[in-house]
Image: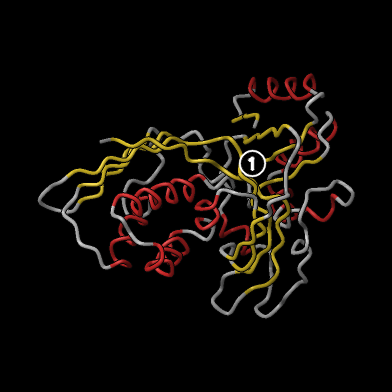
Amino acid sequence: MKHIYSSYGKINIGLKVLGKRTDGFHNIETIFYPVSLHDVVKIEIYRSNNFKILIKTNKKYIPLGEKNTCFKIVNLFFQKLGLKTDDHIKIDILKNIPSGGGLGGGSSNAAVVLKHLIKYYNADMSIFKKEIREIAIETGSDVTFFLLQKPCYACGLGEKLKILNNFKIDFKILLVNPHMHISTKWAYDNLGMKEGEYKENVLNNIEEFSLNNPEIYINDFENIVFPKYPLLKNIKNDMLDKGAVFSSMTGSGATVYGFFKYEDKESLNSLYEYYKSKNYFTYIA
């Protein structure tokens, strides 16, 4: 039997890089916010004589083997839980979320697969809670967020979460990506942070979204990315000039989003059509 799931993306509202760790990674803080943009993940599990993972996707640039997050999370699921199977696990991913755009598509896909495996193989969460968390974190630092799919304050590598039940974006969200791919490693390396250097948390006490202090939601990566990719800065400024009440880059790029009032449909639709005409990825959430 084939099971079909929507696999939703996210945006970062504020992204602060707080320090460089001894393991070479960086501690961050951010607010993860789910958006309606989604991939479609189809999962089919059937009996066989030998265990096999089959990945299929509509985009040629998506890896199908061990570098694929869904492939990785299936392997980790059986390894960490000590389960054995001869099943064939077939995963077909219809990609709508731009890859490498800061929208979390790969991590979201992996979270959908993990939730399905937990249900299909009756993995008792009261017994395997620690292992499930390890599986998510080892697959990707934001996979834990996609298991929840609720607005969250995140810190650490992005895996430590606090659900924000009152955090709501009461605006239309325009997403624009000019088909750029920005290396996350490059972005972190160019921050130039030294090991042991730390900044103070600024987002940890936020419970609701407010425009009273928009500077608190600055994405630190904009200082690195915009000088090298000025087109992204132009998109952000264009959104603000055309009526967005807030605009930012999500993740380390290359997607820029803007918040527009519901009554400001004309400006929103005009920008949408403009970027669509330039063949940029464009979506209204």
**Res 195 → quadrant:** bottom right
Q: Could you tell me which residue is drawn at 47 percent across and 47 percent down?
A: 106
Q: Could you tell me which residue is drawn at 73 percent across and 75 percent down?
A: 198
Residue 255 image offset from top left, x and y in percent: 64, 41
Q: What's the coloring here?
A: secondary structure
Residue 110 image offset from top left, x and y in percent: 42, 50
| Residue designated by label 1 | 255
Q: Nearer the viewer, residue 3 or 13?
A: 3
Q: Nearer the viewer, residue 80 or 94?
A: 80
Amino acid on which disc 1 is placed:
Thr
Residue 56 image offset from top left, x and y in percent: 32, 38
- In this rendering, the answer to whether 121 lies above or below 27 is above
**Res 57 → quadrant:** top left
**Res 192 → quadrant:** bottom right
Q: In which quarter of the image is the C terminus?
A: top right
> Left or right: 136 with respect to 175?
left
Residue 3 image offset from top left, x and y in percent: 33, 37
